[in-house]
Every structure is written in C-alpha cells, then in structure tokens.
C-alpha cells in the first residue's frame, strides 16, 4: 500500500522546488549579455540581471523599486510610459523601442527595448518583463555613416564643376550635383532618370553636333577615360564652352557599374587665353618695333620703322600709314613720310611677294628700300603736299595733335561725335574717308600725328586697333624726341657731370664743416663748463660714500649722485670723442697688446658688476693697420655697452683670430640683447634705448671701423645676449 506524504512535507518539497526553479531562472537571466529587468504595472523595477548592474553601474539594492523612467533620458521617458500603459491596457508586446538609458555616472547609452506582460493563471498581470539590447555602437556607426553621407553630398554639391553619374546600361542619369543643374538650367527631377545624351543634345551648339554620346560609347567599349570640348547655349542666350570628361567606375569583376561625367565651364578661361594670346602677339610686335626704334637715333630710320610696324603683316597690318610732324619754326603740321600701296593692284603684288618671302619683322626692315616691298613714291608725293597751319584749330589733325586725342573716322565722320566731319580736302588727298588718327607727343610736347587706314581691304578699324596704334605712336614719339634731344644732351652731359661732381664735393665739405663746427662748439662748452665740475662732484661723492657707514640713509642718496655724475661724464666723453674724431693715423698695432690694455682699463667695472670675463686672443696674430687710440676707443665702447647690458652680472668675452686677410674680433655678452626692431638703428647717431648715454658710442665705433677699411656686424637675441664682430685688415 502506497504511503501518503504528509501535507507539510509536500509544501516543503514544493517550496524547495520553486526556490530551485527561481535560482535556475535567475542564473539563466544573469547569463544573458543584454539587460533584463522586470517591472510592476506602475513601472517600478522589481528585478534586474547582472548585466544591468554591470553595464549601467546601479547597485541592485539601490535600483529595486525605482521607477524605470528615472534612468531613462528625459526626452525618451514618454516612450517608456506609453509602452507600459499599452502593455497594462491591451497586453500588446512592445518590440524595437529605441531609448536612451542614463548610467549611474551620467553617461548616455542607446538601447533597443522589448517588453511584454507576464500573466497569472487567472489572466491577471503579474509583472512586465523587459529586455534591453545595447545599440550604442550601432548608433555611432549609423551617425558616422550619416555624417559621411552628408559630407560626401556636401563635397559633391560644392564642387564648381558639373558632375553627372550615369547608368551605363541605359545612359540615364543616376545623380547630378548642383553645379551641373545650374549649367544646364534644369531642375533635378528634369535630369535624374532622364537620358544624359538627350539632355545634352538639347543644349549643344551648333544644334545636332555630336557630343557626349561618343564619349559614353568609347568609355563603355574600352573602359578608359575620354575627354572632349562642347559648346552649349541655354535658352538661346550666350554660347559657352565646356570641357567634358568621362570616368568609368568598376566593381571587383572589372565591370563598369557607373560612368561619371565631369563638365567644366571653361568659357572665361578660353576667353582669357585668347586675350592673352592676342596680348602676347601684340607685346611681341611692340617689342620688335620698340627695339628697332630705340636701336637708332637717326630720325629717318625711326620714322621708317614706325610706318613699317604699322603696315606690316608682322605688325598692326594696316594697309597704309601717313606721318605728319610739327614744324615749330614755321608753325605748321606738315607731311613727313608715308608707306603703302597706291591701289589694289599694287597691293596685290606687294603682299604676294611678302607672303612668298616669309620675312620676319627685322628682315622686313632691312629690305625696306626695295621698291617691291615698299613702293611708297606715290603716297609720299601725296603726304608731302599736305601742310596745315597750327592756327587752324578746328582742323581734325590739328585738334588731335593739340588736344592729344585719337579719332576713328568712319565715312568722313568722327566716331562718337557725328556732328564733326573731316575736311573734304584731306579726304580727297588721302582718297579715303575711313581712317584712324592718333597724336604723337612726348612729355606734354606736341610732335605730330599718325594716320592709318585700310583703303585696300576696307577692313573696319576697331578700338583695339586704335589702342595698339597709339602705343606704337607713343614709342615713336619718345624716339623722335630722343633723337632731337640727343645732340644737345650729349654736348651738355660732360659739363653737367663736372658741375655735379663739384656740387657733391662742396656739399660734403659744407656738411662736414657745419657738423664739426656745431659739435666742436658744444664740446668746448662741455669741456670747460661741465666736465671739470662733474669730476669734482664725482670725486666728492665717491669720497663721501666711502666714508659713510653702510647703514646710513645718506649712502643711497650719494649713490644716486655718483651714478648720475658717471652718466654725465660718459655723455661728455662720447660727445668729445665724436667731436674730435679725425682721420686715423694708421700704423701697425698688436691686437693682443691692445686687448690687454683695454681689459686693464675695465677690470674694476667687471668686478663691481659681478661679470665673468674671458679673453681668447691668438698670440701669433700679425699686427693690424690701425690708429691705436681709435681702436682702443672702439673696444672700450663695446665693452662698456656690454657691461651696461648685464645689470645682474653675466658672461663677457673678447676673442681675436685670423679670418683670411683680416683679424676677426668678437665681443660677446650674455646681457639683455637688442630688440629685432632696433637692430638696424643701433649705429645711427643719437639712437639709444637707455635712460643714460648719448647714443653716439656705437655710431663712433661704426665710423672708426669704416675709416680703417673694416666692417662690423651684430647678432643679438633678446634676453640671450649680443655678439659684435669686427673685421680689420692686417698691416
């Protein structure tokens, strides 16, 4: 007979089984790498797994019974609240809810949350089970991808060239940047999805011209890069020039998946290139004519060169040219020279012969006397008969010369002023009513006028041609004026040179005498009225200071008196040295002996200022050619400058060594240095940055070195020190 288990024992058995089941469940939940949590119907946290504690940092005992929305980012709390309401009201399962969860240290993490209700046997809601998967890295990657996409689109649309991506299978546009849409004047929807060649053919000029279809075909067939030029016109307006290139995009199988077309609007560049070519050609012509004109002072050669340059095919290519010069003595503008054919038949012979010979401009000038290349007899007969008094101020040629104006005459009327008609006599003599008139003048001096026409070819004269003609005329004007003045200038040149040399010598002597006179008077006053009292004052102050106990307040006052006295003594000494500066008395001087003397003279100052001094002089140096007293003054000035630059002590050195035919002497200190802005001013007279001193010391040093045929250079760095380097020739 089966034994019946007591009720209490059954209950214990059930409790134990339930406890084991809960432990297995918790162990299973804790092993899940995602956050697992349970909530009550009000959103309070009932339980969490280990991943929750580990990844968010909240202790288990702290987080239990805490509302879930407390750890949700404020902007996402409404999402969680709404989800809990939906679950409690309808039992719906919530999937893929993205929310930001705040960690205990304030960091923000992105999670994808799934939630569902857990119900009892009676259908009552026991709790809400939730699982949160960390998608922070995915969100970062998505943000990076989005940023990269936006960045690429920004670059794509910011490129000034038009870019189109085309499907190689049907030639339809996949995408196009803003520059392309602007170039073709179409909206994006009118481009994307439409065939590229159809879009282009509607714009290409001349209409029906083959353009980009062949480019796409060549790229598809060969997989290479192709380029071509294309002319387009938007709405029948300005025709613009484009350079179009195709670039295939291939996959790993080397199959073309897309074709990129890059279109550059090069209209402005081509226009500038054409203008540049024209300017280069014009400059080349001007150079040749200018060189030819400036290479001679013979007036006839200058005039011939000018007219050949105006009419030659290698020049301005006018048919004919006429030159009129002002006769100052008679007060008339008279014809001087002309060049060009008399009729079309003569022109044909001339130009045919010139084309056959292929002459350069220089060669053309050399063959100028050949009647075939320059049969100017008839035109010269015409021009020599024209004489116009300058008093006829209404005459076209006189007006152009006197007012310095250029005129373009068309059908006998001056362009820009249709009320002004040229003189009938002039038109009859020239056998032309269409020509250009430019003045010849130099330095505001009237010289004459130049006329050029296209009587044979009837080619209209444009403004650019008149501008070039004026440039030619300017060259010729200067050359003509130079030719006229050359003889007179040559005659006066030597007299003027002698006069200038004398003036310079006298001016230098006068300035030197004035300087010496002024400084000498000042020096005498200082010597008699200032220096002697200063010596007495300084002596008394020094004596009183030595007798005054260190703790006596008057000792500081005596120090001030002594310091100011020394400053004034130095000022007087510098001014006196500057005033008595004279030409050096050159004799052989031993550098080592001179350095020893100077060191003995400053050793007290060195000790008093706590300066470590080093001497490095090559004893085998040959003597230098110098005035010993002046060189001693140079070293003293440099050493005292260095001492004054080291108010708190430092290092000071003087060295001397051979450098070719010179002795190289360096005075280096570790003082305050010289500001870069002042480095070029220190040798100027009276320049100083010190509160004491005259600003004459370094100027005197520079003068002495210069008089000795040497040079001095300075290198300095603020707060690091200064090095003066002197080069003096050996005897």
Image (cartoon, rainbow, N blue to C red):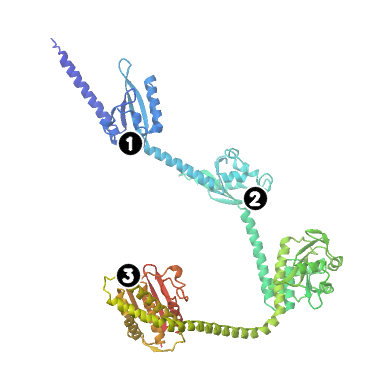
Q: What percent of the width, then of the height, locates residue 158?
A: 53, 47
Residue 319 drawn above or below residue 5 = below
Instruction: Report the front residue among 655 and 438.
Output: 655
**Residue that numbered label 2 is attached to:** 240
Q: Residue at x 23, y 23 (%)?
A: 21
Q: What percent of the width, then of the height, locates residue 576?
A: 44, 82
Q: Going from the N terminus, do you reach mark 2 or mark 3 first?
A: 2
**Residue that numbered label 3 is attached to:** 648
Q: Going from the N terminus, do you reach mark 1 or mark 2 first?
A: 1
Instruction: Report the front residue among 687 and 158.
Output: 687
Label 3 crowd (10 A; few <14 / some 14-19 / many >=20)? few
Residue 676 drawn above or below residue 172 = below
Image mark for residue 103: 1
Q: What percent of the width, then of the height, locates residue 287?
A: 66, 70
Q: Going from the N terminus, do you reach mark 3 or mark 1 first?
A: 1
Residue 259 drawn above or below residue 74 = below
């Amino acid at each position: 007979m089966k034994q019946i288990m007591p009720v209490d024992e059954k209950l214990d058995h059930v409790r134990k089984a339930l406890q084991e089941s809960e432990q297995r469940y918790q162990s299973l939940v804790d092993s899940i790498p995602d956050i697992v949590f349970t909530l009550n119907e009000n959103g309070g946290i009932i339980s969490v797994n280990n991943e929750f504690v580990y990844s968010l940092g909240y202790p288990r005992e702290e987080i239990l019974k805490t509302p879930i929305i407390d750890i949700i980012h404020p902007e996402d709390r409404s999402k969680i609240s709404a989800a809990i309401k939906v679950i409690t009201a309808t039992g719906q399962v919530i999937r893929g809810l993205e929310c930001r969860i705040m960690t205990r240290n304030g960091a923000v993490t992105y999670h994808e949350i799934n939630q569902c209700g857990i119900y009892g046997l009676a259908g009552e809601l026991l709790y809400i089970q939730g699982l949160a998967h960390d998608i922070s890295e995915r969100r970062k990657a998505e943000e990076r991808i989005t940023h990269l996409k936006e960045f690429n689109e920004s670059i794509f649309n910011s490129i000034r060239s038009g870019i189109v991506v085309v499907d190689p299978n049907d030639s339809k546009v996949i995408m196009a940047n803003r520059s392309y849409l602007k170039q073709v004047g179409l909206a994006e929807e009118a481009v994307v999805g439409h065939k590229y060649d159809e879009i282009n053919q509607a714009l290409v000029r001349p209409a029906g011209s083959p353009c980009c279809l062949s480019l796409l075909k060549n790229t598809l067939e060969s997989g290479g890069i192709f380029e071509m030029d294309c002319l387009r016109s938007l709405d029948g307006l300005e025709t613009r020039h484009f350079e179009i290139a195709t670039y295939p995009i291939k996959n790993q199988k080397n199959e073309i998946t897309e074709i990129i077309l890059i279109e550059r609007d090069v209209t402005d560049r081509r226009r500038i290139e054409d203008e540049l070519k024209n300017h280069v050609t014009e400059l080349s012509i001007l150079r040749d004519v200018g060189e030819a004109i400036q290479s001679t002072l013979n007036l006839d050669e200058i005039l011939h060169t000018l007219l050949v340059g105006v009419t030659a095919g290698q020049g301005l290519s006018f048919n004919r040219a006429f030159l009129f010069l002002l006769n100052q003595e008679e007060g008339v503008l008279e014809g001087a020279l002309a060049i060009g054919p008399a009729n079309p038949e003569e022109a044909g012979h001339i130009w045919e012969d010139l084309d056959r010979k292929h002459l350069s401009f220089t060669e053309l000038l050399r063959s100028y006397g050949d009647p075939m290349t320059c049969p100017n007899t008839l035109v010269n007969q015409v021009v020599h008969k024209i004489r116009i008094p300058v008093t006829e101020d209404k005459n076209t040629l006189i007006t152009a010369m006197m007012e310095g104006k250029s005129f373009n005459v068309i059908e006998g009327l001056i362009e820009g002023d249709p009320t002004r008609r040229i003189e009938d006599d002039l038109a009859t003599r020239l056998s032309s009513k269409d020509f250009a008139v430019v003045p010849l003048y130099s330095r505001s001096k009237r010289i004459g006028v130049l006329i050029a026409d296209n009587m044979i070819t009837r080619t209209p004269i444009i403004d650019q041609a008149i501008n070039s003609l004026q440039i030619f005329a300017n060259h010729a004007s200067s050359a003509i004026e130079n030719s006229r003045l050359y003889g007179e200038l040559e005659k006066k040149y030597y007299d003027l040179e002698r006069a200038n040399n004398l003036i310079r010598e006298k001016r230098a002597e006068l300035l030197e005498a004035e300087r010496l006179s002024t400084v000498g008077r000042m020096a005498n006053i200082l010597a008699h009225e200032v220096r002697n009292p200063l010596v007495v004052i300084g002596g008394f102050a020094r004596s009183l200071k030595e007798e005054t106990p260190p703790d006596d307040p008057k000792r500081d006052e005596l120090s001030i008196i002594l310091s100011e006295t020394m400053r004034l003594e130095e000022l007087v000494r510098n001014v006196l040295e500057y005033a008595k500066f004279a030409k050096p008395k050159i004799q052989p001087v031993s550098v080592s002996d001179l350095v020893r003397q100077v060191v003995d003279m400053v050793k007290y100052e060195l000790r008093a200022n706590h300066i470590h001094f080093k001497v490095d002089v090559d004893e085998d140096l040959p003597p230098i050619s110098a005035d010993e007293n002046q060189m001693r003054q140079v070293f003293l000035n440099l050493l005292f400058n260095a001492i004054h630059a080291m108010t708190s002590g430092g290092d000071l050195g003087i060295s001397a060594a051979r450098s070719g035919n010179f002795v190289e002497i360096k005075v280096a200190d570790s003082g305050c240095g010289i500001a870069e802005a002042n480095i070029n001013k220190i040798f100027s007279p009276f320049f100083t940055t010190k509160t004491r001193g005259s600003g004459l010391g370094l100027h005197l040093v520079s003068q002495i070195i210069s008089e000795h045929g040497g040079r001095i250079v300075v290198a300095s760095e603020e707060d690091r020190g200064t090095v003066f380097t002197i080069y003096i020739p050996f005897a």
